[in-house]
Image: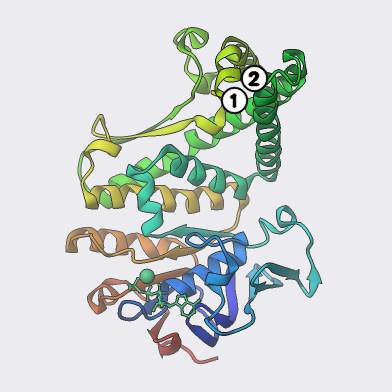
Amino acid sequence: MKIQRLRLQDFRNIRACDLAPEDGINILCGENGQGKTNLVEAIYLLANLSSFRAFSNRKLIRHGAPAARIHGVMRTGATEKELAVELMPASKTVKVNGKGVARGVDFFGEAAVTLFSPETVKMVRGAPELRRRFLDTALSRVDRGYLLDLKEYRRILEQRNRLLRMVREGRVSVAALHPWTTQLAERGGRILHGRCRYLSELSAVAVEIFQQLHHKESSLRIVYRAALPRSLMAGIPVESLDTAALKARLVDGLAQSERLEIQAGATRLGPHLDDLLLEVADRAARDFSSQGEGRLLALSLALGEARLFERLKGDRPVLLLDDVGSELDRRHQGLLCEQLPDFGQVFLTTSERSVCEKIPAPKALFDVTDGEIALVMGKQK
Ligand SMILES: Nc1ncnc2c1ncn2[C@@H]1O[C@H](COP(=O)(O)OP(=O)(O)OP(=O)(O)O)[C@@H](O)[C@H]1O
Ligand SMILES: [Mg+2]
């Protein structure tokens, strides 16, 4: 997939822009605070309907403007598609080929975009939630069934937690909990199985990319950490179990912890609490990786996600690389740049001209200054 045309209006500090990006590497170069990440954010939003760094529309609409608009013409093979998102302070409208789309889940998947940004790097050292979010987003992009399971799991979890508190307060009997426990385990088993299967493929790709980027014999290992009692697993790795067996483990685990869960008023095990263990040279990256190593690791996961998307869906996603060169030394910047031509359409932001010079065969270079985006090198269309 590629973006043929991108038009923005009143998005963050970008008053208006109309770009015709190229198929290969598009560089967005500019000083700090000029609007490079804003442009990347707009493209991300076109695929995800949400931002990776803001939760309210108000922040995304240019100060003083009533609404922000993002319009993209996407092309896959010979097929073109128009996506339009309009953001108002308290609502948004979404259109595909001019026709309104009511539910977010029906839109997700219309555009294939993979993101690497400084936010992605946070997953190496941050809370488990960041690693789960990365995995869930990546997996939802290739498996719509997974996205629906996840949505349903969250709904059941909320309901079950409410019931746990009602049982604690003596307002309903414990028996009322059980149908919800079964439903939660049903979806939970599917989510666990989906995650383990996806992760085994992603790991293989990411490990290879990490080696190419790092160019050192420090191996990367990614392990799924399920929040299931050890007594139930009996040493069996979670990834070797099928959906039914995972569901059964969740049912048993939830039964075991029922008393504690009622006390706590919260569900204490299941995929909403799981984690990914990232290890470099047999040590947890969370505790031991350097700044640059953490960045290479997060990059390997993001590039791995893009590769795996291509393998599973037969189409290359648009790759967004925000601030990708910073914190990398010259050698690692060079190793990264060598990889880039193997991806499809890439948008890469940088504040350093020296990074631009390393990139092999960039197709377009845009200058970003005070929200104005100007083509410096490439074909005017
Ligand atoms: N809703 C908004 N309306 C107007 N301007 C905004 C809005 N939101 C953010 N900005 C401005 O956008 C600018 C930041 O843009 P952006 O994050 O894209 O910078 P950048 O070019 O990526 O910089 P860096 O190199 O530091 O990452 C800031 O000056 C900020 O004040
Ligand atoms: Mg930025």
Residue at point 51%, 79% (across, down): 21
In the rendered image, residue 112, in percent from the top left (x then y), is placed at 59, 60
Instruction: Look at mark 1 in the image and give the residue it sits on.
Output: 265
User: Horizontally, is 180 left or right of 69 in the view?
Assistant: right
Residue 155 is drawn in which quadrant? top right
In the rendered image, residue 327, in percent from the top left (x then y), is placed at 23, 60
**What's the mark number on residue 227?**
none
- The three-letter code of the residue at mark 1 reads Gly
Above-or-below relation of 104 to 75: above
Instruction: Look at mark 2 in the image and give the residue it sits on.
Output: 168
Q: Nearer the viewer, residue 48 or 199?
A: 48
**Secondary structure type for disc 2:** helix
In the rendered image, residue 308, in percent from the top left (x then y), is placed at 51, 47
User: Horizontally, is 165 left or right of 231 in the view?
Assistant: right
Residue at point 53%, 19% (across, down): 240
Above-or-below relation of 102 to 139: below
Split into 4 quadrants, where in the image is the C terminus? bottom right
The answer to whether the residues at label 1 and label 2 have Cβ atoms under 8 Å apart is: yes
Distance between the Cα atoms at labels 1 and 2? Answer: 7 Å
Q: Nearer the viewer, residue 363 or 129?
A: 129
Residue at point 56%, 30% (across, down): 271
The mark lying in front, picked from 1 and 2, is 2
Above-or-below relation of 10 to 274: below
- The three-letter code of the residue at mark 2 reads Arg
Above-or-below relation of 90 to 370: above
Question: What residue occupies the far right of the structure in this picture?
Answer: 99
Residue 93 is drawn in which quadrant? bottom right
User: Horizontally, is 373 left or right of 48 in the view?
Assistant: left
Of labels 1 and 2, earlier in sequence is: 2
Q: Nearer the viewer, residue 224 or 131?
A: 131
